Image: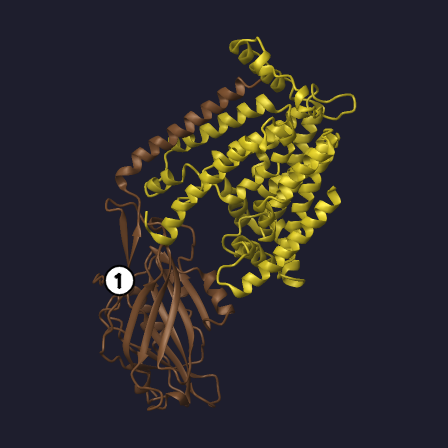
Chain colours: A yellow, B brown
Amino acid sequence: MDLGRMLCFSVILRLLLLLYGEWQDSHMEVRYTDVDYLVFSDAAALVSAARSPFERSTYRYSPILAFLLVPNSIVHRSWGKLLFSAADLFVGVFIYRILKERCVPEKSRLWCVAAWLFNPFTFTIGTRGNCEPIVCAVVLWIIICLMNGKVFQAAFWYGLVVHFRIYPIIYALPFVIVLNTKNVGTSRKPILSQWAPLQNIPRERSSSKVSRASLLSHNISCAWVSLRTIITKDAVFFGFFSGSVFFTWTALFFHLYGWDFLNEALLYHLTRTDPRHNFSIYFYHIYLRHQQGFSVLEKLASFLPQLMVQLCLVLRFARDLPFCLLLQTVAFVSFNKVITAQYFVWFFCLLPLVLPWSRMKIKWKGLLCISIWMGSQVHWLMWAYLLEFKENV
Amino acid sequence: MGLMVLSIWCISAFSNTDGSAPQVSPTNKEISNPSVMGCLLSLHYDHGDSYFYNHSGLSDPEFNDVLNLDILSGDSCDGIIYDIEMFGLSSLTRYLIGEGSHRQLFTSMLFDNQPETAKFHEHSCVGILIERLPAGVFADHFQLQHLVDHNVFLGAYVHGDRNLELPSALSNGSIVEVHTNIRSDADKLVVRLPLHARYPPIDSSGYANITIGRPDVFMRCRQKGSKGGYFSWFFIDMGSFSKSIVTWRIPSGYEAHAWVVTTVTFLSALVCSVLIILSSLYFM
């Protein structure tokens, strides 16, 4: 199978799911459509009537999303789902392109693309009307731009995507580090590690004679070099231009919608704590303490692990950009004070970028890892189900 | 014609803590006769919003004053219906359907005068149920709108605290208004109102009991074929149905667990983050 056929099959699958979603929405009490999609659609209808999207309660996104979905009220209510599913397909194409530029063989590339396109979690996300595939596509496009030395374009999209969804702000440091002089060759392209057959990868861990102490000092000195050489012309330009794009969009919408925009689309996400059942380890602590409020010490204590882990991962792995972004995203989601299932898509789109370098075989270690991950979620969700629908906890 | 003002609503739905079993409420055989309020052009009762504009919480005496002053003062008009006994109710049944945090509040009201023996069928009527919900539960106004779109209700409105996310301790009460069509041959008015429990305050017992009092019921009628935009409005006193209060038992966190959970949570986060940092630094 080639990429074209794979994409055709993916398009058909998504169109069928869209049709099924329409049927379920009109015939069953439980909707297929994500409740957030109804929020987006309501906000889009408000925007098309020249009103603020923030008149719709629980709309906590950039107004750009509402504008993108204006055809929902003019053309068809499924317009947004088509848009998100198209972004979902673009993610597949971008994964293929990144792996091709990193010289990964065709067969491995296709397996990695399939890991995204045929992941049941991801193809339902877009067809149910979740906007995350757009963010994933833009993040991957930024990686492609950086790999090809298109710093201007990368900075533009980065400023835009941070305005759109905030969380990619955690990628700022690795993006800047990868642009430093050490990583940019004469072609101005950042040197990303190329693929090599597994048997050619030196088994450093088993053959290395270096002691743990010298390894530690070597890693710390590498991190220090990364940090010291961070300020380059490209890095300053990237930071300045992406920051300008971010602030321009933010200022524009602040001018249009005032504090409603700033509070709902930006500040809400920075201060969000959810006492209701979610995947975060902090949720129950937040629930048990929500009546008395949280001290500054508690807020710092919950932010500190997140900060330490992010800094460590960036300084240690920034030179292998896709791997670093994947680790950062997994860690960011894991230590977040609120985690919903849609957050998993943030790292699902980055996982295929590192799969060719993994020594793990799907049989049986890979399957075991997938089972543990799914099993822990099912276990967590079982308690949520008993609490929400049975009150039998 | 003079002003017809009702001064009912003396019994506070919220002050009555005579809790019944969550699933079943007994049926009372007393008859509740309606009272004429007068004629109003408005199809929609929207005084809940004006009440919450001036008040931060739902207090029964204050809300009753608003109803008495603002609503129960319709003037008479041509075609006002005086033969109101046919709209009396003989029973009220209330209970919660389902389990967990998402349930339906079932309300069934049986008309005292059967349609075949009265002139009920000569009128077209709309029943308006007004539920006063305490802070612990809420109705999702988007879900209600969905039901209106699917013709389950003629209209549905939520006044007061419409926040769908906040826990009970940070919420206020709300008023839900449901309009439902009454068929000419109907012998009862049935409403299934979807409700959701908020996360309750922590408690030493591990449970919180939410009490939902009896509803207020209006009927808006006019004779079939009558012209003009006026409707006769009736208020049906539910005070005679004494055992119509529903109690919802919701699990809550234990107060004694708070410090253990906080300690374990922060220790886990710290240990995991240190492990990640160490394995990163020793990563080959």
Could you tell me residue A260's position as x and y percent? 52, 50
Q: Nearer the viewer, residue A194 or B123?
A: A194
Q: Quadrant of residue A240?
A: top right
How busy is the neighbourhood of tag 1: few (under 14 within 10 Å), some, or many (20 plus)? some
* Residue occupying the point 67% across, 62% down: A75
Residue assigned mark 1: B14
Q: Amino acid at mark 1?
A: Phe
Q: Say left or right for A282 vs B235.
A: right
Q: Nearer the viewer, residue A352 or A243?
A: A352
Could you tell me residue A140's position as x and y percent? 67, 37
For the image, the number of numbered tags is 1
Could you tell me residue B283's position as x and y percent? 55, 19
Q: Nearer the viewer, residue A1 or A293?
A: A1
Secondary structure, mark 1, is loop
Q: Say left or right for B24 vs B157.
A: left
* Residue occupying the point 38% across, 30% down: B266
Question: Can residue B25 be spotted in the picture?
Answer: yes
Which residue is most to the left?
B18
Q: Quadrant of residue A363?
A: top right
